Image (cartoon, rainbow, N blue to C red):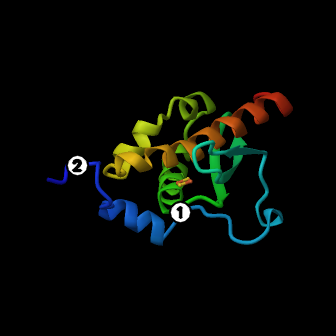
Amino acid sequence: MVQEGQDWIYSETVKDHFLNPRNFLMGDEANFEYDAMGLVGNPICGDQMKVYIKVRDGKIVDVKWKTYGCASAIASTSALSEIAKGKTLDEALEIKAEDIDDYLGKLPKHKFHCSVLGHDALKDAIEKYREKDGEK
Ligand code: FES
């Protein structure tokens, strides 16, 4: 018997975000004026993720991202970019991988680690923003 989250079936929301990724950075980084970029690698699979943030008055006003990650990483980061927009930096730091998983209607359990990639890259971007520019 197939149990929820333990199979290879992707939710309709996951498929939508994979096939129509939101806020994906097309082309070169020069195409997006950002304030900080976070970069992480996934130790489980070796994939990489970059998340770029634009910050105004302490809020994330825009997010872009690029990845070498899999379909689940693409869908997760697409969802994350939608969740994070408009949040303060502190609110964005409170976003958990479980929130992304819920937003997507659950990833297969063995793909949950893929949702952590964008999440960690966003945290890295926020930390770099705070180190470099301080709160604006
Ligand atoms: S398998 Fe590498 S991010 Fe999903």
Residue at image position (56%, 35%) is 92
- Under mark 1, the amino acid is Arg
Local SS, label 1: loop
- In-front residue for pair 41/28: 41
Q: What residue is pinned by disc 2?
A: 4
| Relative image position of residue 36 (x, y in whole percent) | 77, 44
Q: Is residue 105 left or right of residue 128?
A: left
Residue at image position (70%, 36%) is 124
Placement of the C terminus among the 4 image quadrants: top right
Local SS, label 2: loop
**Residue furthest out toward the left:** 1
Q: What residue is pinned by disc 1?
A: 22
Q: Residues within 10 Å of mark 2 (few under 14, many from 20)?
A: few
- Under mark 2, the amino acid is Glu
Residue at image position (48%, 70%) is 20
Asked whether disc 1 touches disc 2, contact meaning CB atoms under 8 Å apart, the reply is no
Is 135 located above or below residue 44 in the figure? above
| Relative image position of residue 9 (x, y in whole percent) | 30, 61
View quadrant of ligand 1: bottom right
